[in-house]
Image (cartoon, rainbow, N blue to C red):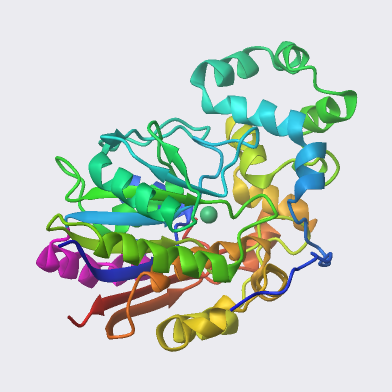
Amino acid sequence: MAVKREKLKSIPGTTIFDGAESRKGYRINKFAMSFTKPENRRAFTADEEAYMEKWKLDQKERKFLRDRDFRGLIEECGGNIYMIMKIGTCTGHGLYHVGAQLRGQTFEEFLETRNASGAR
Amino acid sequence: MAKIIGGIGTSHVPSIGKAFDMGQQEEPDWKPVFDAYKPVQQWLAEIKPDIAIVVYNDHGSSMFFDKYPTFAIGAADSYPIGDEGWGPRALPEVPGDPEFSWHLAEELVYNEFDITICQELSVEHGFLVPMNLCFPHEPNWAVKTVPIAVNVIQHPLPTAARCYKLGQAIRQAVDACERDLRIVILGTGGMSHQLNGTRFGHLNTVFDNDFLDKIENSPQELTQLTHQKIMEEAGAEAVELIMWLTMRGALSNKLTRIHRNYYAPMTTGMGLIVFEEND
Ligand SMILES: [Fe+2]
């Protein structure tokens, strides 16, 4: 039942969260993971700039975050979708908002592609 | 003697938990998924398992990439409700059976599954959504649990075949337990979905239904699936399906499939399959 060693190949339109991504995204993902504590969510909401400074985010990460550019955080900064969604939830951007951004669509356009968009 | 009496493959989509909490079970777009579990709840109430082994993954609640275990097992008296970034859900802590967890851990490790043992573990949607769909929780949960967490989010992931073998090893470990326990095992996650890139929202109903066929009749074939193949066909996050193979590996081939459902309303193929052991 041995399975051949598999080298992952890139898939169009897809981010595979592997070691390289995890290393690249370690800071932003750790920052996002901090949102699992209510006091950290409150600190971010109270003063976003101070909270980003506390975590020493780089300028690119800060810009994407200010712009609510979740695509940038994921695709350019190594953000893991599950971590980034902790930030998104805090800023009022749910998964389907982020998904529409990733697809380059409006939220409404994206919902139209779904089978039963009431289940959200 | 402890005995596995059934297995369940089920999606663990987080929005189901939210809909559950908001009481949206009867809303037209949600009803098909919630209704599908009613006979499963009834079946579980009849067969009365003592313990549910729940194979799931942590999406950044109790575990982070500083140390993310490939396989981990909970061994606590109870599992608190985790905060995934939006506050813990209002659910009672989930009871564990640490004695049984340690038994499993010991058997698994001596069977060459070097699993990480967690004496403190909060649980999140990967674990809780299937629990909500299958078991009542008021005033307290109707079953004790053993969480088994699998890394399906940070490659390299364990292979499909490895996950199946973990299930086989769990079965051996259960067989070696002297206590009189009736056990069900849940394999959770998937089915097709992708949550990143321009392919966000990718679904593959054909793949999902074929997987449901094969998990019943030819699981060996599924153990040959590579992560690459699953991701290409069914989306990057569909690799979670390898956790269903742990459930299936823990079952025999003398099974009756008693329920099956499939519904893909938004971005995830929500699958359900239920097996009962014949003897
Ligand atoms: Fe998941």
Left or right: B160, with B179 as reference point: right
Q: Quadrant of residue B231?
A: bottom right
Q: Quadrant of residue A78?
A: top right
Q: What secondary structure is the stretch in magenta mostly built from?
A: helix
Instruction: List the single residue furthest toward the front.
Output: B110
Name the spot of residue A53 as percent of width and height, x first: 78, 13
Does B227 appear in magenta?
Answer: no
State the residue at coordinates (44%, 58%): B111
Whether residue A35 is visible here, answered yes or no, is: yes
Whether residue B10 is visible here, answered yes or no, is: no
State the residue at coordinates (82%, 38%): A24
Q: Quadrant of the C terminus of chain B?
A: bottom left
State the residue at coordinates (70%, 53%): B155
Name the spot of residue B182 as percent of width and height, x first: 17, 62
Q: Quadrant of the N terminus of chain B?
A: bottom left
Front residue (pair B135, B185): B185
Front residue (pair B4, A81): B4
Name the spot of residue A12 as percent of width and height, x first: 84, 67
Q: Is residue A27 above or below residue A114?
A: above
Left or right: B41, with B194 as reference point: left
Q: Is residue B87 above or below residue B181?
A: above
Does B47 appear in magenta?
Answer: yes
Q: Which residues are magenta?
A: B29-49
Left or right: A59, with B37 as reference point: right
Name the spot of residue B25 as percent of width and height, x first: 31, 58
Q: Is residue B190 above or below residue B21?
A: below
Front residue (pair B274, A3): A3
Q: Is residue B81 above or below residue B126?
A: above
Front residue (pair A112, A85): A85
